[in-house]
Image (cartoon, rainbow, N blue to C red):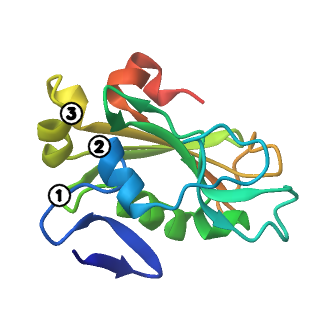
Amino acid sequence: MIALVVAGAAVASTSSGQITGFGATVKAWNAHHQADHRGNLVPGCCYDPIPSAGTGLLYADRYYAVMPIGGHVISYEMRPGDGKGIPVSQAKQAAMNELPADAHLKSFTVHGGSCAILIAYSAALQHQLGHGKAGGGVVVEFSSGAAEDSYNARSVNDLLFSSLMIAGSTAQNC
């Protein structure tokens, strides 16, 4: 099994096309991410521990609030740049790296200083998740700040991934 690396971030599929990021089966996700068992964390919530220095957190993980639904990981938050804030161009690349290689950007909309929303689509995700075209749709909310309640294009520190099946008509709102 080969994991591709682009600009320092793992691409979320293997050379065989197995999805290991957004939309992965729980088994594939667990095989490609290190569960964090520190402290009182809920089992299966947090993956890929990162140094907490500079994040203001006791424990920090690259992936948190991981929610498998129907046997697939279709909702989670990610700290790109290990939570230290990166330019939006790098954050977009980090978001797209979480998706299968066939994913393409449908839109990217900035909502003032509150957040930005990326919508992407992948036929591989549609095949993996089913449920019509929405099964291949992904919504990623970009946010900044210690409380992750604002948006600064120079310092994105949180990406919230959701399936378009879940987000539905609220996909364009922050």
Residue on which the image places disc 2: 25
Q: Position of residue 151 (x, y in %)?
A: 69, 48
Of helix, strand and loop, which one carries label 3? helix
Q: Residue at x 53, y 40 (%)?
A: 66
Frontmost residue, 51 versus 34? 34
Mark 2 against mark 3, which lies toward the viewer? 2
Classify 10 Å Cα crowding around label 1: few (below 14), some (14-19), many (20 and above): few
Question: Which residue is under mark 1?
Answer: 102
Up/down of 90 relative to 47, above or below: below
Disc number lying in front (1 or 2): 2
Residue 121 at x, y = what percent? Answer: 24, 44
C-alpha gap between disc 1 and disc 2: 18 Å
Quarter the C terminus occupies = top right
Using the rendered view, name the quadrant where residue 44 is placed: top right
Q: Is residue 101 above or below residue 63?
A: below
- Name the residue located 62 percent from the left edge and 70 percent from the top edge: 81
**Image x and y of residue 168, in percent:** 38, 20
Name the residue furthest top. 169
Q: Is residue 143 left or right of residue 173?
A: right
Type of amino acid under label 3: Leu
Q: Nearer the viewer, residue 101 or 141?
A: 101
Q: CA distance from mark 2 to mark 3?
A: 9 Å
Closer to viewer: mark 1 or mark 3: 3
Is 19 rendered above or below residue 72? Answer: below
Spatial CA distance of label 1 from label 3 is 15 Å
In terms of sequence position, does the residue under pointer 2 or pointer 3 come before the other? Answer: 2
- Inspect the image, locate mark 2, and give the three-letter code of the amino acid beneath it: Thr
SS at badge 2: loop
Residue 71 can be seen, yes or no: yes
Give the residue number, with chain letter if any, for mark 3.
129
In which quarter of the view is residue 141 placed?
Answer: top right
Q: Is residue 14 left or right of residue 59?
A: left
